[in-house]
Image: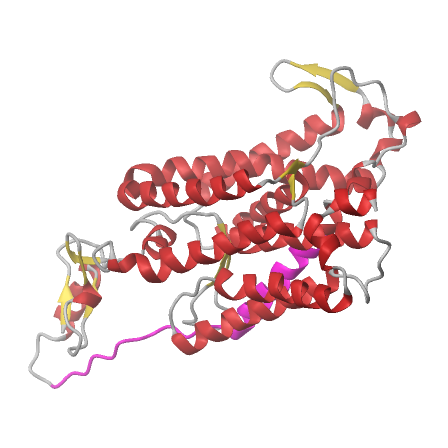
């Protein structure tokens, strides 16, 4: 069955009745109004015609690139989250900065872990029912929020690796009306990030906008690593296990409560004109191949736990080989690899945390029990320092 739209859309046959629910046995496809006009012109004569439905293939190459990108972000974010990395500039080279305090990480608790899942679920439901009205607002929030992440990352690189603090004009202080006391370098970087974000907003529907979106996403994810940390494996387990069931429910179970529609899938796909940008996206390398995507949460949530294992190794003076950072990275890499294998086999979107949580958290727990470090991991920094 070929269903031709009366408008230039190819998403729904009628309100609330998706095309794939019309029949379990008859193949059916919906085409846009423009495409229907083309087919009608070609089928005007009585000669026999064949219509072939094209299904995009999965691009294994872009999956591999996404796998490398995700692990790279997790590794960089973990090292950046270590407090010693915040001390970038020698004090004698810094001009006095009144009213400026160093940023400290927010320590996640049981309450914040549970609140995160509740707020996330509530946000999903709001977007599920009011996507058409809120999608532009969410895109604007992403653009505004990414400014801070990009600014922090670029500022970190320029100061630590290019040592621009040695140039006096870069450190010259200005009192700005909106952002307060900033030096010349900070003003320049802030302006660049604002222009970058505004540019993405206006070209977000272009075919090459994924480049800007991924750059903004890297900055956003890395800023989360710097801003939050787990105090121990207890809190980590609470948040990750809740996120594990959160993903399963909103992807696989929610269709039983929402007229056959997966809440997570519908929110992730956005509207006919807009999609939510809170994910990494790589276009298919081969002609006709579909894009590869990975949500920010699939990097940030396991990543903050992985950064905790790195801090744990540093405090206990463990090496890469007898510590837990490498163990967690291996678990994360295997989990993400299995996610893409499941995607290829099942040919439908997969909740990555379904595979990432057991392999990242579970592998660290098993290895720590075997090595006798589980108690220290369970109690966290306070137990280690007092011991």
- Residue 188, compared with residue 299, is above or below; it is above
Identify the residue at image location x=15%, y=52%: 15
Percent position (x, y) of residue 278? 48, 48
Q: Which residues are magenta?
A: 48-76
Percent position (x, y) of residue 243? 49, 53
User: Is residue 242 rendered to the left or right of residue 181?
Assistant: left
User: Is residue 361 rendered to the left or right of residue 208?
Assistant: right
Identify the residue at image location x=60%, y=17%: 178
Q: Nearer the viewer, residue 382 or 8?
A: 382
Colour setup of the view: secondary structure
Image quarter for residue 120?
Answer: top left
Of all residues, the one furthest to the left in this rendering is 46
Query: What number of labels is visible?
Result: 0
Q: Nearer the viewer, residue 264 or 30?
A: 264
Percent position (x, y) of residue 158? 78, 40
Quick check: is 282 in the magenta stretch?
Answer: no
User: Is residue 360 rendered to the left or right of residue 83?
Assistant: left
Of all residues, the one furthest to the right in this rendering is 92
Percent position (x, y) of residue 93? 90, 27
- Residue 254, compared with residue 327, is above or below; it is above
Q: Nearer the viewer, residue 60 or 338?
A: 338
Answer whether residue 214 is visible to the viewer in this image. no
User: Is residue 371 rendered to the left or right of residue 14?
Assistant: right
Image quarter for residue 11?
Answer: bottom left
Answer whether residue 177 is visible to the viewer in this image. yes
- Residue 36, compared with residue 279, is above or below; it is below
Identify the residue at image location x=54%, y=50%: 238
Image quadrant where one finds the N terminus: bottom left
Identify the residue at image location x=6%, y=82%: 46
- Residue 77, compared with residue 340, is above or below; it is above
């Amino acid at each position: 069955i070929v269903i031709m739209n009366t408008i230039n859309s190819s998403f729904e046959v009628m309100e609330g009745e998706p095309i794939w629910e019309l029949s379990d046995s008859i193949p059916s496809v919906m085409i846009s109004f423009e495409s229907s006009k083309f087919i009608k012109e070609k089928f005007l004569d009585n000669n026999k015609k064949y219509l072939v439905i094209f299904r995009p293939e999965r691009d294994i190459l872009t999956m591999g690139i996404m796998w490398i990108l995700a692990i790279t972000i997790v590794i960089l974010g973990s090292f950046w989250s270590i407090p010693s990395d915040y001390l970038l500039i020698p004090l004698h080279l810094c001009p006095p900065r009144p009213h400026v305090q160093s940023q400290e990480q927010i320590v996640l608790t049981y309450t914040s872990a549970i609140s995160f899942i509740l707020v996330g679920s509530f946000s999903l439901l709001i977007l599920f029912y009011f996507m058409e009205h809120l999608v532009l607002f969410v895109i604007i929030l992403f653009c505004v929020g990414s400014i801070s992440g990009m600014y922090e990352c670029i500022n970190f690189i320029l100061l630590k690796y290019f040592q621009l603090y040695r140039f006096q004009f870069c450190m010259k202080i200005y009192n700005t009306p909106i952002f307060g006391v900033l030096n010349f370098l900070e003003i320049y970087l802030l302006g660049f990030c604002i222009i970058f974000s505004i540019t993405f907003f206006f070209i977000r529907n272009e075919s090459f906008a994924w480049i800007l979106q991924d750059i903004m996403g890297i900055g956003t994810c890395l800023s989360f690593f710097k801003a939050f940390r787990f105090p121990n494996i207890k809190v980590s387990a609470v948040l990750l296990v809740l996120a594990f069931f959160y993903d399963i429910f909103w992807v696989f179970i929610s269709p039983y409560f929402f007229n056959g529609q997966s809440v997570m899938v519908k929110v992730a796909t956005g509207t006919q004109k807009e999609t939510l940008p809170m994910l990494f996206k790589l276009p298919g390398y081969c002609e006709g191949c579909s894009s590869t995507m990975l949500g920010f949460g699939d990097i940030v949530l396991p990543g903050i736990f992985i950064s905790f294992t790195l801090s744990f190794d540093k405090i206990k003076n463990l090496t890469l080989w007898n510590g837990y950072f490498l163990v967690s990275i291996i678990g994360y890499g295997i989990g993400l690899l299995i996610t893409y294998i499941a995607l290829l086999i099942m040919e439908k979107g997969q909740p990555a945390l379904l595979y990432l949580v057991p392999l990242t958290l579970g592998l660290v727990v098993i290895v720590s029990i075997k090595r006798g470090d589980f108690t220290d991991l369970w109690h966290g920094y306070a137990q280690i320092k007092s011991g």
